[in-house]
Image (tube, rainbow, N blue to C red):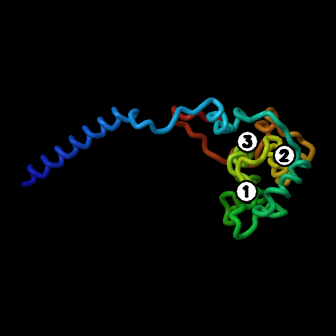
Amino acid sequence: MLKTHKSKLLATAAVIAGLAGVTVANADTYNFGSTPTAEEIAAVDIDVMPDGRGLPAGSGTATVGETVYKETCTACHGPDLQGVKGTGGAALTGGRGSIGTEKTKKTVESYWPYASTVFDYVKRAMPFNAPGSLTDDQIYAVTAYILHKGNIIGKDDVLDASTLAKVEMPNKDGFISDSRPDVFNYK
C-alpha cells in the first residue's frame, strides 16, 4: 500500500514537472507584457546609494525646504517634525542617543545611518498622498530642512549630488557591516 502511494506521488510530481516545462517553453506565445523603453526604465531607476551614486542633478537648502515641508509634509509629520497621531507620519527629529535604551526613538536624526537614504525615501514615497510629485530640487531642500532641524547640517548648507553623501549622520556607526562576500559593504 505504501509503495503504491509513493508511486502515485512520484508519477504526479513527474506530470507536474513536465507541464511546468511545457508552460515555460510556450510562455512567449501568450503575448503578455512588453519590453520597457529606455524612458520607462529611467522613470523607475531612481535608487540612491549610501555613497551618493544615483543622486540626480539639483540642489536645495533648509530655508527653501521649510516652505516645501510646510506645504507637503506638515499634515502628517507636524509643524515640529514630531509626527501627527492618526496619520502614520512618524517623528523625523529627536531621540539622538536613545537607540538601545528604554526610551528608544527612531527618527532620521537618531537612527538613519546615511543622509542619502532620506533623499531616496522622500523621492520614492513622499508626500504620502502624492509620491513622486516633488522635483529633485524640492527633495534636496526638504531633506536639508529635516537634517537642519535635527542639528545635522547648517541652515544655509547646500545639499546636492556632491554634498549630500558627505553628510555625517549621528548614527552612522550604529549598524553592523554585512561581511558576506556576495554583499557590497558601503562602510
Closer-to-camera residue (37/164): 37
The percent coordinates of residue 137 (x first, y second) are: 83, 41
Residue 90, quarter of picture? bottom right
**Is disc 3 in contact with disc 2, using a CB cutoff of under 8 Å?**
no
Q: Identify the mark at residue 175; answer none if there is no mark.
A: none
Q: Which mark is residue 116?
A: 3
Query: Who's the residue at 75% across and 63% down the image?
Result: 76
Q: Nearer the viewer, mark 3 or mark 2?
A: 2
- Marks 1/3: CA distance? 15 Å
Indicate the amino acid at tag 1: Thr
Is residue 187 visible in the rendered image? The answer is: no
Question: In which quadrant of the rendered view does residue 26 lie?
Answer: top left
> Is residue 141 among what the camera can see?
yes
Measured as percent of width and height from the top left, residue 181 is found at: 52, 32
Residue found 88% across the figure and 53% down from its top: 67
Q: Closer to us: mark 2 or mark 1?
A: 2
Name the N-terminal-most of marks 2 and 1. 1
Q: Is residue 132 left or right of residue 147?
A: left
With 48 as the anchor, is 14 left or right in this view? left
